[in-house]
Amino acid sequence: MASSTQRQKGDSCGPQERRIVLLGRDWLEKSLTGNTILGRQLFDIRRDVEMCVRRQGVHDDGRRVTVVNTPGRWIHYSVQDPALVDRNLADCMAMCPPGPHAFLMVIHISSHKGREWTVEGPLELLNDTYLGGR
């Protein structure tokens, strides 16, 4: 059995690197979450954007972290323009090769916006567009 040091050296996706994609409706909440994960303010919280944004940081212990923030209204696009969702997700995946370790759903605790803003709606969308309905 290999030691954890040996695994870290041979495993580029080991504990020394994490890639996270933030999902949810509100750009501000996702940006604040991303800034918390990164340990400093790297996401601009003053304005919403219509494309994926990647920020990277290194924690004090040397761990590299990549956080990709998705557009604030990306779920709403699924109704208006499903192809735009596909492009946004493809862009997000390209920003954290070979792919994210985690999708982090950021949901305001008192959200009453409907199913598309709950956990189930975005998971269905991810399943249909990114995971191929598996």
Image: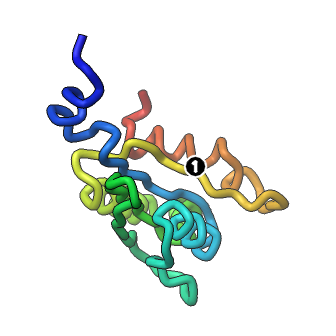
Residue at 25% from the left image edge and 57% from the top image edge:
94
Which quarter of the image is occupied by the N terminus? Answer: top left
In the shown orientation, is residue 58 left or right of residue 32?
left
- In the figure, 22 relative to 54: above or below? above
Residue at the extreme left: 10
- In the figure, 114 relative to 130: above or below? below
Visible in this render: residue 86?
no
- In the figure, 47 relative to 60: above or below? below
In the shown orientation, is residue 119 left or right of residue 83?
right
Label 1 sits on what residue type?
Pro
Q: Which residue is mark 1?
A: 122
SS at circle 1: helix
Residue at 26% from the left image edge and 21% from the top image edge:
3
- In the figure, 26 relative to 15: above or below? below
Q: How many marks?
A: 1
The type of colouring in the image is rainbow
Q: Nearer the viewer, residue 17 or 89?
A: 17
